[in-house]
Image (cartoon, rainbow, N blue to C red):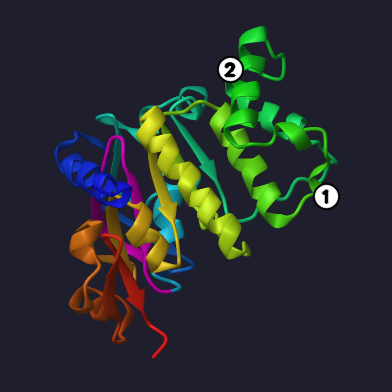
């Protein structure tokens, strides 16, 4: 039995996992325009859930509400059964970590210094021996040991993104939210990042929510897919159920052929 087939069977078994995050009837307006319209979705523990859809679908807005970066107009977001608004900020930072699209840090930092920022919810910048142990583990997990003393402005795009993900790992949260982490990365680094996320779920039982534009990354590495369009969820389910021509036509308004390669469904949308 191939590794790909084993992985597929493991992901199918995850259908029975408990719900970790519940979004119920959430809406959001910006400048009088409705960006999210009565959105409801469940995210299961120990899975990668990919949010896909065209630009302007509301994906980034939705995960901003789930992480409480933005405030919802109505509805509820439950994390482990508790409404997100009832969490103290310090406690929420120990529950959920988020990596946004743009990470603008105006001071010159090394990788090691950046990763140590992930311990702020626990240490308030007074790192203990235990805090540094989490920093060291994150640096090793992201294979950054050899370049940990390099400054961020000396890194390639892929190295920099790995450093930011290491900072998120050092935060040691059960839930990790990533908003388009593959933007501006080449194929090699994109694959490396997705394999790392898969390991975090499979080896460390993390729950990951990721906004991703390339539907083939969603297909090959996700457990579940949430497809959005015009501020609504139009398709939701296991990745092997969502990646089909009818569903993708509904999401993207175009014909997309599907081929199976090593038990993965690959979308061919170049014709």
Q: Quadrant of residue 59?
A: bottom left
Q: Which mark is residue 261?
A: none
Using the image, determine if residue 124 lies above or below residue 9.
Answer: above
Name the front one of labels 2 and 1.
Answer: 1
Instruction: Say whether residue 5 is left or right of residue 193.
Output: left
Q: Position of residue 158 (x, y in %)?
A: 66, 53
Instruction: Say whether residue 129 is left or right of residue 27.
Output: right
Q: Is residue 103 visible?
A: no
Q: Position of residue 141 (x, y in %)?
A: 57, 32
Q: Which mark is residue 153?
A: 1
Distance, label 2 to label 1, CA atoms, is: 27 Å
| Residue drawn at point x = 38 percent, y = 50 percent | 72
| Residue drawn at point x = 65 percent, y = 22 percent | 136
Asked whether 52 falls inside the magenta stretch, the response is yes
Q: Nearer the viewer, residue 1 or 85?
A: 1
Q: Quadrant of residue 112?
A: top right
Q: Position of residue 13 (x, y in %)?
A: 17, 41
Asked whether 2 falls inside the magenta stretch, the response is no
Q: Which mark is residue 122?
A: 2
Which span of residues is magenta-colored? 34-54
| Residue drawn at point x = 69 percent, y = 36 percent | 144
| Residue drawn at point x = 72 percent, y = 34 percent | 114
Instruction: Say whether residue 217 is left or right of residue 42.
Output: right
Using the image, determine if residue 216 lies above or below residue 193.
Answer: below
């Amino acid at each position: 039995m191939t590794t790909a087939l084993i992985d597929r069977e493991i992901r199918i078994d995850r259908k029975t996992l408990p719900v970790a995050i519940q979004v119920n009837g959430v809406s959001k307006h910006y400048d009088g325009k409705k960006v999210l319209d009565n959105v409801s979705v469940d995210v299961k523990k120990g899975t990668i859930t990919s949010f896909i859809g065209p630009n302007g679908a509301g994906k980034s807005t939705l995960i901003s509400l789930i992480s409480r970066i933005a405030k919802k107009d109505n509805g509820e977001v439950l994390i482990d059964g508790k409404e997100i608004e009832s969490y103290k900020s310090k406690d929420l930072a120990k529950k959920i970590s988020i990596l946004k699209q743009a990470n603008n840090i105006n001071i010159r930092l090394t990788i090691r210094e950046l990763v140590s920022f992930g311990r702020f919810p626990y240490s308030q910048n007074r790192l203990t021996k235990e805090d540094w142990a989490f920093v060291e583990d994150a640096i090793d997990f992201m294979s950054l040991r050899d370049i940990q003393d390099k400054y961020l402005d000396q890194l390639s795009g892929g190295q920099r993104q790995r450093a930011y993900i290491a900072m998120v790992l050092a935060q040691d949260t059960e839930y990790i939210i990533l908003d388009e982490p593959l933007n501006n990365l080449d194929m090699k680094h994109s694959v490396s990042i997705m394999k790392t996320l898969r390991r975090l779920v499979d080896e460390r039982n993390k729950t990951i929510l990721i906004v991703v534009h390339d539907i083939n990354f969603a297909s090959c590495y996700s457990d579940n897919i949430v497809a959005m369009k015009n501020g609504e969820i139009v398709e939701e389910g296991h990745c092997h159920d969502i990646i089909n021509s009818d569903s993708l036509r509904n999401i993207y308004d175009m014909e997309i052929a599907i081929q199976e390669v090593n038990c993965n469904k690959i979308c061919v949308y170049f014709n």
